[in-house]
Amino acid sequence: MPKIGVEQSLTAVQEALQQKGYDVVQLNNEDDAKGCDCCVVTGIDNNVMGISNSVTAGSVIAAHGLSADEVCQQVESKINQ
């Protein structure tokens, strides 16, 4: 199953992704994003952890303004590309 990094303040997103069977890791610093297939951040500052500096080859999704289900849909579409 794909590994998804989720910023720690996005608890509802973490829980929704775990219910769908994804391997979810909390993003506390830049190193946590390594090896993730996709990362979900709040979107307040997409570069707050340096993720946009190509730490991960996966997609980065800004969750600002999205429900947990909408974020899950975006994750699924990025993973299945």
Image: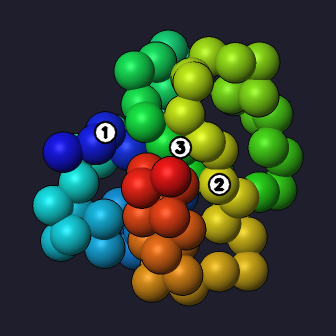
Which of the marked residues, 1 or 3, is nearer the chain's N terminus? 1
Query: In screen coordinates, is 4 left or right of 60?
Result: left
Which quadrant does the N terminus fall into?
Answer: top left
Up/down of 38 relative to 44, above or below:
above
* Residue at (55, 34) in percent of width and height: 58
Query: Marks 1 and 3, Cα distance to the nearest angstrom?
Result: 9 Å
Q: Is residue 5 left or right of residue 40?
A: left
Q: Residue at x 31, y 73 (%)?
A: 16
Q: Which residue position holds label 1? A: 3
Closest to the observer, 76 or 11: 76
- The percent position of residue 24, horizontal first and vertical second, equals 29, 47
Q: How far apart in space, not on screen, are marks 1 and 2 (Cα)?
A: 14 Å
In the image, taking residue 74 as reference, residue 1 lies left or right, namely left
Say what amino acid the circle numbered 3 marks: Cys
| Residue on which disc 3 sits | 39
**Residue at x 43% of width, y 36% of height:** 37
Q: Is residue 72 left or right of residue 1?
A: right
Question: Of the residues shown, which amino acid type is indicated by label 1?
Answer: Lys
Q: Earlier in the sequence, mark 1 or mark 2?
A: 1
Q: Earlier in the sequence, mark 3 or mark 2?
A: 3
Residue designated by label 2 = 61
Please state which amino acid type lies under the numbered disc 2.
Answer: Ile
Numbered disc 1: secondary structure: strand
In percent of width and height, residue 39 lies at: 53, 43
Asked if the residues shown at circle 3 and circle 2 are in contact, with their CB atoms under 8 angstroms apart, the answer is yes
Mark 3 to mark 2 CA distance (whole Å): 6 Å
